[in-house]
Image: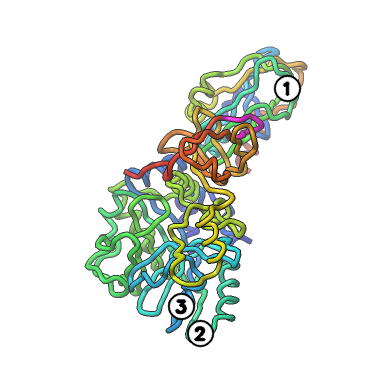
Amino acid sequence: MSNVPSDLKYTKSHEWVRVDGDVVTVGITDHAQHELTDIVFVELPETGRKVKAGEPCAVVESVKTASDIYAPLSGEILEINQSVVDDPALVNKEPFAGGWFFKIRLSAPTDINSLLSPDKYQAQIKG
Amino acid sequence: MLKRTALFSAHQKLGARLIDFGGWEMPVQYTSIVDEHNAVRNAAGMFDISHMGEVTVSGAAAVEFLNRILTNDIRKLTPGLGQYTLMCNEQGGVIDDLYAYQLSAGVYLLVINASRIDPDVAWLKAQHEKFSGRDDVRLTDASHNYSAVAVQGPRVKDFIDAVIPGASVSAMRVPRVTDLKKNEIGGFKFGNGSVLVSRTGYTGEDGFEIVGEAGAIMSVWDKILQAGAAHGVKPCGLGARDTLRTEVCYPLYGHELDEQTTPIEAGVGFFVALDKGDFNGRSVLADQKAKGAKKKLVAFRMADRSAPPRPHYPIWVDGANAGVVTSGTQSPSLNAGIGMGYVPPASAGPGTKLEIEIRGKRFAAVVVKKPIYKVR
């Protein structure tokens, strides 16, 4: 059973979003890391890059495949987590904590209403 | 509708993640590719290989027929011996790579790739049709009659005799399964029936492949999980099978081998017996062996930390696009990106610097001697 913390927002493509004013932290969910297993490489965007919601902006690679990670919301990449680049297994070990990917300064903070609630995401991964 | 093996419900029970592999619904992993890979390298792992095909060829002219259509010299086989061999078209292109066993005088078993059963059988039938001694050769596709498992790893020899006890009763006669040597095959009584056991595999490790009817193989599967538990046996999926064979540079049909590629180009010329008389593709293969081929399969290792190389990524040499990756992954044993691919012969020597293009950027790699990983 995958962990779906109640204080986060989610996307259909299995990113989680922690909202802090107009800055959001983004990672991949416990469900996603479990599906991927054995994450061996993470490629993150450059800080300062402008991203649009739904745009691929990072890559996570398991032994078997490479998967795109999408920007959940539009804005500018404010910070990236060098720790997951150095130790990709962090994404498997603590997807909601040390395994975060990047932070975005939102261009339109009201966009967060487009994200999935924990209940809706839970329902999606059950289905 | 995907085909399922007799072990399908066993995979479901073990929580396997299933994928489409050449039309078969097969486990790609049960827990983690890395854990399963390490189980095979350090202890033991078991694979469902029931999707593979089995063809029997028998009769007074079977040896002559097989020597016309396979590259290795089938006359080297005596009852109970097997060999790796290839089946080529007239241009020397590989129709399939396979194992041929002699079960008894004039009786041969060919174990072929799952994805190639239909083209192989069609090719074999066409070759049989035009073979002058066809009345003395009987060809049967027995793929639907057989299930199979592979059990691989350094600890397998410690429990396999308890799974399949007793002496063999056909093919290679040995007192116990563990008395079989590499490439030998024996028939053993098992339950109310029998199974064929060969000391072969696709991982580089010591181990066995066991072929039999569905009921027997379902029982072998359960017994291996029980008897092997204390030795660390794990059920393993196609994900680990792929990383294991890539580390030891075993070719996979559809990746390193296809109908446009010859055994010489693929680096398996050792299994082409040019001196045995005429056979399909011989003139092209002899020519390539004498004058060299246009492309050569190399093994490589990424020089620095990078994303893992993957099939179809371009290979660059001296700033020019020189070839393509056929297999690539993150090696769990070496914790490095590794792969195989085709390059011009001039760039095939160990130590040659390559670049692998990954998502538009090029990363340094170096040609290494095969196998990339040496089994301890």
Q: Amino acid at mark 2?
A: Gly
Q: Which mark is residue B276?
A: none
B45 is higher (above) or lower (below) than B187: above
Viewer-nearest residue: B277 or A110: B277
Instruction: Choose mark 3 or mark 1, whichever is in front.
Output: 3
Viewer-nearest residue: B348 or B43: B348
- Pointers 2 and 3 in contact (CB under 8 A)? yes
Measure how far apart labels 3 and 1 are at the Cα level. Answer: 67 Å
Judge the density around disc 3: few (<14), some (14-19), many (≥20) Cα neighbours within 10 Å.
some
> In which quadrant will I find the N terminus of chain B?
bottom right
Q: Amino acid at mark 3?
A: Glu
Query: Magenta stretch: dominant SS?
Result: strand
Residue at the (61%, 30%) spot, across then down: B362
Viewer-nearest residue: B85 or B56: B85
Magenta segment range?
B357-363
Q: Position of residue B242 (x, y in %)?
A: 49, 48
> In which quadrant will I find the C terminus of chain B?
top left
A9 is higher (above) or lower (below) than B240: above
| Disc 2 target residue | B133
